Structure formats: structure tokens, C-alpha cells
Amino acid sequence: MTRLELPALRHEADALWGFAERQFNLVKRYWAWEVLWLFYSLVSVLSIGYLASGLGLAGFSARDFHRTQLYLLVGSLLWSYLSSVFTDVSFAISWERWEGTIEYTFMAPVRRLTHLLGICLFAIVYGLLRSAIVLAIAIPLFKLDLSRSDLLAASAVLAAATVPLVGIGILAAVLPLLSPEKGDQMAMAVQGFLLLVSGVYYPLSVLPGPFQVAGRLSPLTYTLSGIRDCLLNGHHLGDMLPTLGLLLAMGAVLIPGGLVVFGWAEGRAKQLGLLKRSG
């Protein structure tokens, strides 16, 4: 690496951190809304936990009840994290347009990869913190026993799953870019479809054939399945290597593909004058 390349890399690193810091400042500005969304995430997870508790009164054995409760809670908690990252990334353009900074951001002398990865960095860290708070409340409430779980393997699966999730978020961010009026609603529809086909609350086998095919193409399916295997069945890191490889391979396709599509959408939005419109 030459000395001329070092300042350029330092500039991109500073820019990446700057975009992440800007997202954090937006959260601080609208902190009351963030408290509300944290409450919503907590209530959603607790509702699923108490649903499992209700099923426990229907004649399940203690072992089946524990597995069912943990199965549903893992799905709910993971969906809370994954949907949080997806939402923060896919709505980045809407935030830019709302704040009136979108034109300045697109004119800034930074790579689009740096811009989007800075947003993704914030979304991942913030999503993990919010999910950790929910988990810390859920564990004592439901007396969850994770003594037989391999938390290291589960963490590795979650880390690998973040890579394709970022790619999906970048692809979804194209929708608000192309449609200021309805792009956010379209992104929410994509999120709802992922919830349907990814096995968050049920195995894929209960879905009709076409939905099962869509579920097998979703990285979230393998994320949920892998983490459940680690937490419910005690699978170790070595057992998860195929899942880790598959998730990373999906990310290697989705992130470059998302950047290509985003670049095309950015050019089209500039050509049609869609950046400044607020809907």
C-alpha cells in the first residue's frame, strides 16, 4: 500500500464513521420515538412468550412446553433485531429526504459503499443494543434455561447473517429512492413477506409449496434455523459451518448486487428529479 493510498483510506473510514454518528444523532434528536419503538419491540416479544405460556396450559409436557416457548421467543427476538436492522437501512433514504440532506449526501466526495456501510454499522450496533435490553427483561420473566445452549455458535450465526441482511436492506432502500410517495410502504411490504416465508414462528413445512421455495431463498430462514439449533439442540460451531458458509455466500451476492441496483436507482432519481420531493 502506497503512502498516497493511506489518506484516501483514512478519509473513507472517517466518512463511514461520520454517517454512523449522524444516524446516532438523529436517534438522540427523536429519542422519545426510540423509547416508543423499544417498548413496541419489548411488548411484541413478551406477547409471543406469554402465548407460549398459554399453550403450556393446554396439556403439553414440561419438556415440550419449554422447547415451544424457547422456539417462539427466539423467533420473536431475532425478528425484532433483524427487522430493526432492515428498517434502519431501508429507510435511510427517507430519513435523508425528511432532513433535507439527501442532495448534499449524494454530492459528497465519498463512495456510495462508504455511505451505506456507515448507515449499516449504526443499524447493527443499535439493533443489538435494543435486542439485548429486550432479552435481559425476557430471561428472568420466563425463567429461560440456556445452560445447554452454545451461545458462541449462535453468535457466529447471527454475525454471519448480518452480511446478507445488509444486502437486503440496501436493495429495499432503492424503493423509497424511486418512489417518494409509496416507497416506505413498499419496503414494509417486503419486510412483511420476509416475516411470512422465513419461518419466524413456524417451520417452513407448514407453508404452501411456492412460499417454501421463497423461504429457502431467504437468508433469515437459515439464520433462524441455525440459531435455534444452537440454543435448543446444543449444536456447536463446527455443526454450523455449512450454515455460516451459506449465509456469507448469500451476503457476497446480495451486497454487490444491492450496490449495483442502488447505483442505477440513484442515477434514475437524479435524472427524474426525485431526490428533493417529500411526497
Image: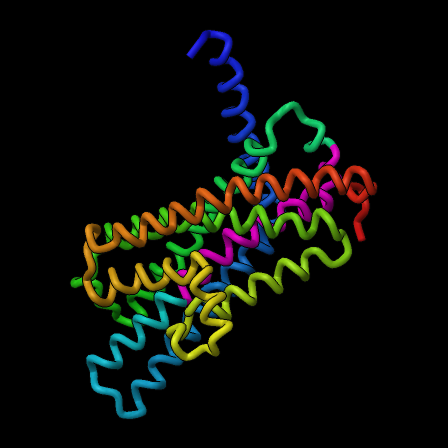
| Magenta stretch encompasses residue 249 | no
- On the image, the x and y values in percent for residue 45 come to 42, 68
Relative placement, left or right, of 274 versus 234 is right
- What colouring style does the render use? rainbow
Relative placement, left or right, of 210 versus 139 is right
Residue lying at 43% horizontally and 59% vertically, measured from the top left: 220
Which one is in front, 197 or 147?
197
- Considering every residue shown, the one lying at the far left of the view is 148
Write down the quadrant of residue 266 in the picture: top right
In the displayed structure, 48 sits above or below 9; it is below
In the displayed structure, 45 sits above or below 1; it is below
Which one is in front, 7 or 160?
160
Residue lying at 36% horizontally and 47% vertically, measured from the top left: 159
Q: Give the dominant element type of the magenta stretch: helix, strand or loop.
A: helix
Residue lying at 62% horizontally and 48% vertically, measured from the top left: 173
- On the image, the x and y values in percent for residue 101 come to 72, 36
| Magenta stretch encompasses residue 77 | yes
Relative placement, left or right, of 258 versus 208 is right
Which one is in front, 88 or 266?
266
Q: What is the magenta range?
A: 76-103
- On the image, the x and y values in percent for residue 193 come to 55, 67
Quadrant of image for the N terminus: top left
- On the image, the x and y values in percent for residue 216 come to 43, 63
Relative placement, left or right, of 252 versus 54 is right
Residue lying at 60% horizontally and 52% vertically, measured from the top left: 172
- Considering every residue shown, the one lying at the far bottom of the view is 59
